[in-house]
């Protein structure tokens, strides 16, 4: 199966002026500026297959949004090759733009003072969507996101979560094959996040769309993505299954157990995280997990014992702590 998104040694570098603080430095800068090269994206490569939902992770400034903008044709790469649906995004071919969408959680495309329905009609005109098809798709999305009572209100009167759902409907009315979603649940409460996740999953199921998702909410990634791509300092750090990411970067396992009788010193087995009555939770180095669990079962009156991988949030935090020098 051929890839719908193909990236090879993609890079985006910026020349940024710099100077020291102070009036003298400012005066010198009028005649001779010095620049430094900022490598927003620095030679990343990956392929995505049709219908995949892939998490695209990294800390702020890692290069995620820059990559999405290059994939959607908003930015020209400094070097490297990229292809989406067989098109070169930077050429902004009309046939290409009709098949993709870019949704950014901190950007608005709907008219602020008009009801969302009016903005939806504008989208129909922009994409030349046949009227019957447009009405069917619009009503389908409104039902999926439970927006029937909101679409006639001016957008400025909607809550953040309601506006975000409207933005997503507007962005998908032309039924794109490729979704670039940049923090679509940014700033939303847990209920709204869950509703949008469910909608994205349903859209992927119904239309076989390919999704590249960035999010700082790990619940989004765990719910939608089997595969994750992690970039840091503009470089590719990991590409594989989410479970493999946990295994690679988690140095600890969480061991929880219940004991019949109190134990005086549990620190000899591992780092005790919490004690709730007879239930104890501790962190144990991954390579020592088997030995520690054997000791617990042999030396204590253990009623119940569980071993779990570290929470994904902890794993991601350890991934993001990698310094740039180690990626060179």
Image: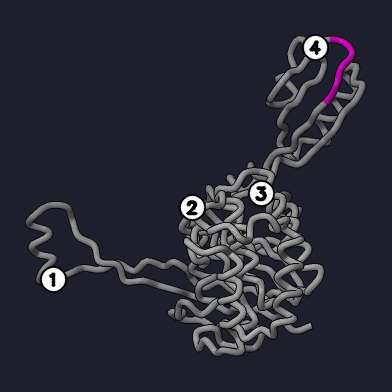
Sooner in the amino-acid sequence: mark 1 or mark 2? 1
Q: Residues within 10 Å of mark 3 (few under 14, many from 20)?
A: some
Of 161 and 1, nearer the camera is 161
Residue 220 visible in the snapshot: yes
Magenta stretch mostly in which secondary structure? strand
**Which tag is nearer the camera, tag 3 or tag 4?**
3
In the rendered image, the vertical position of residue 177 relative to residue 18, given as above or below: below
**Which tag is nearer the camera, tag 3 or tag 1?**
3
**Which tag is nearer the camera, tag 4 or tag 1?**
1
Sooner in the amino-acid sequence: mark 3 or mark 2? 3
Q: Residues within 10 Å of mark 4 (few under 14, many from 20)?
A: few
Residue 321, x across and y down, in percent = 53, 47
Residue labelled with disc 4: 263
Of 94 and 173, nearer the camera is 173
Q: Residues within 10 Å of mark 2 (few under 14, many from 20)?
A: few
Sooner in the amino-acid sequence: mark 3 or mark 4? 3
Q: Residue at x 76, y 36 (%)?
A: 288
- Drawn side of residue 248 relative to residue 180, left or right: right
Residue 134 location, quadrant:
bottom right
* Span colored in magenta: 257-261
Residue labelled with disc 1: 32
Q: Residues within 10 Å of mark 1 (few under 14, many from 20)?
A: few
Q: Residue at x 72, y 65 (%)?
A: 141
Which disc, if any, is residue 192? 3
Residue 234 visible in the snapshot: no
Q: Secondary structure at mark 4?
A: loop
Q: Residue at x 62, y 79 (%)?
A: 124
Which disc, if any, is residue 323? 2
């Amino acid at each position: 199966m051929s890839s719908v998104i193909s990236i090879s040694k993609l890079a985006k570098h910026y020349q940024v002026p710099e100077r020291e603080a102070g009036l003298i430095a400012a005066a010198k800068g009028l005649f001779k500026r010095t620049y430094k090269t900022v490598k927003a994206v620095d030679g990343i490569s990956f392929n995505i297959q049709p219908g995949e939902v892939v998490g695209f992770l990294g800390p702020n400034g890692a290069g995620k949004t820059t990559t999405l903008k290059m994939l959607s044709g908003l930015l020209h790469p400094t070097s490297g090759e990229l292809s989406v649906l067989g098109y070169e995004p930077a050429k902004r071919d009309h046939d290409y733009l009709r098949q993709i969408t870019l949704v950014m959680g901190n950007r608005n495309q709907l008219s602020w003072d008009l009801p969302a329905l009016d903005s939806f009609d504008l989208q129909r005109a922009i994409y030349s969507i046949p009227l019957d098809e447009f009405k069917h798709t619009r009503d389908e999305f409104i039902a999926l996101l439970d927006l029937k009572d909101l679409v006639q209100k001016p957008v400025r009167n909607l809550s953040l979560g309601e506006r975000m759902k409207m933005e997503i409907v507007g962005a998908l009315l032309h039924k794109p094959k490729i979704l670039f979603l940049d923090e679509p649940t940014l700033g939303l409460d847990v209920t709204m996040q869950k509703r949008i996740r469910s909608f994205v999953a349903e859209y992927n199921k119904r239309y076989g769309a390919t999704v590249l998702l960035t999010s700082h909410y790990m619940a989004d990634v765990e719910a939608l993505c089997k595969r994750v791509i992690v970039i840091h300092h503009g470089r590719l750090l990991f590409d594989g299954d989410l479970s493999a990411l946990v295994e690679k970067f988690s140095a600890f396992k969480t061991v929880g157990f219940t004991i019949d009788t109190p134990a005086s010193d549990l620190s000899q087995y591992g780092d005790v995280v919490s004690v709730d009555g007879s239930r104890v939770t501790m962190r144990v180095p991954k390579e020592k997990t088997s030995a520690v669990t054997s000791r617990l079962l042999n030396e204590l009156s253990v009623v119940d014992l569980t071993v779990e991988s570290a929470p994904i949030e902890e794993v991601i935090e350890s991934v993001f702590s990698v310094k740039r020098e180690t990626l060179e």
